[in-house]
């Protein structure tokens, strides 16, 4: 069976699926086609049910919960760290609700959590890799950074205004769940269970063969220095990625509960895992 596997062209996602790409796990008869797109595109495609399994922003899950079910692994969670709001110069936190902020897409979890932290605000959707350029040019006063921008903003001359992972940890005592892997419900329960086991094995193989998986991941590091790429992967591929566990599942439920209370979703959320 052909499984189109959607994920971002980032070092952390590449690390998770190195073993699949390298033929280091038993695929149990599944044939995988890796479909690499930015997370906003994957979110939009999930609304259409385009791919059999895909990475999405957790914010998107309630909008696709009729088509997709959460896999119990593959999560991107930050324990006390996460997306960062930056500006050209120091800025009071209170000002964020008064200015325009460049964001990487309103379906991203980063956007949702920023709404939780500061309330409604003016924003401009910008591809994630152009946000620093928008701030630098003065087109906007601040930008919401995801991916490797969380590690490079200081070297680029920006100042941190708010770390959403820190804010969430102080609010809840939980890690911040940002991305999730989901699979299409119409595959059927038996196929979903077997597919889940194959994908879990890929993540586990990467963690057990870190050097080889990192060498592959560096091909997707967008020019990051090796030590920064290694740090980035370590931030978002860890024991919570291998399995949500009780803490991870609690974090998912708490984030979606708070978002539901904000009126962020059109219908009640059903948190369901394979």
Image: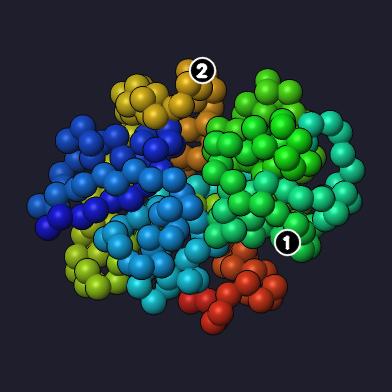
Residue shown at 34% from the left, 43% from the top:
36
Residue shown at 35% from the left, 73% from the top:
67
Q: Secondary structure at mark 1?
A: helix
Residue reaching furthest to the bottom = 267
Above or below, 47 against 205 in this view is: below
Residue 160 percent coordinates (x, y)? 77, 35
Residue 52 percent coordinates (x, y)? 27, 60
Are the residues tagged 1 and 2 within 8 Å (C-beta)?
Answer: no
Residue 197 appears in the rendering: no
Residue 248 percent coordinates (x, y)? 53, 56
Q: Earlier in the sequence, mark 1 or mark 2?
A: 1
What is the crowding at mark 1: few (fewer than 14 residues within 10 Å), some, or many (at least 20)? Answer: some
Above or below, 102 against 194 in this view is: above
Residue 225 bears which disc, if any? Answer: 2
Q: Quadrant of residue 11?
A: top left
Please name whichever residue, 200 or 67, is drawn nearer the observer in this view of the structure: 67
Q: Going by the image, does 136 lie left or right of 109?
A: right
Above or below, 46 against 207 in this view is: below
What is the crowding at mark 2: few (fewer than 14 residues within 10 Å), some, or many (at least 20)? Answer: few
Count of labels shown?
A: 2
Above or below, 232 against 187 in this view is: above
Residue 61 bears which disc, if any? Answer: none
Please name whichever residue, 76 or 204, is drawn nearer the observer in this view of the structure: 76
- The Cα–Cα distance between marks 1 and 2, rounded to whole angstroms, is 33 Å
Residue shown at 59% from the left, 68% from the top:
256
Q: Quadrant of residue 12?
A: top left
Q: Which residue is mark 1?
A: 116
Residue shown at 73% from the left, 23% from the top:
157
Q: Quadrant of residue 120?
A: bottom right
């Amino acid at each position: 069976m052909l499984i189109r596997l959607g994920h971002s062209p980032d070092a952390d996602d590449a690390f998770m699926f190195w073993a699949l790409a390298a033929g280091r796990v038993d695929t149990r008869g599944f044939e995988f086609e890796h479909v690499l797109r930015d997370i906003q595109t994957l979110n939009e495609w999930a609304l259409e049910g385009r791919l059999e399994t895909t990475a999405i922003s957790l914010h998107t899950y309630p909008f696709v919960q009729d088509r997709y079910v959460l896999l119990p692994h593959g999560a991107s969670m930050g324990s006390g760290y996460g997306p960062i709001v930056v500006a050209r110069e120091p800025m009071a936190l209170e000002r964020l609700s008064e200015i325009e902020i460049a964001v990487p897409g309103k379906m991203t979890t980063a956007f949702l959590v920023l709404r939780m932290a500061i309330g409604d605000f003016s924003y401009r959707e910008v591809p994630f890799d152009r946000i620093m350029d928008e701030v630098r040019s003065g087109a906007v006063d601040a930008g919401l950074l995801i991916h490797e921008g969380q590690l490079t903003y200081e070297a680029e001359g920006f100042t941190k205004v708010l770390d959403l992972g820190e804010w969430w940890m102080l609010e809840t005592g939980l890690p911040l769940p940002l991305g999730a892997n989901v699979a299409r419900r119409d595959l059927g329960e038996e196929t979903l269970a077997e597919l889940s086991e194959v994908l879990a094995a890929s993540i586990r193989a990467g963690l057990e063969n870190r050097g080889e998986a990192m060498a592959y991941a560096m091909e997707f590091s967008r020019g990051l220095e090796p030590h920064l790429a290694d740090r980035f992967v370590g931030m978002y591929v860890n024991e919570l990625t291998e399995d949500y566990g009780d803490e991870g599942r609690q974090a998912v439920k708490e984030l979606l509960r708070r978002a539901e209370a904000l009126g962020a979703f059109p219908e009640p959320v059903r948190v369901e895992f394979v």
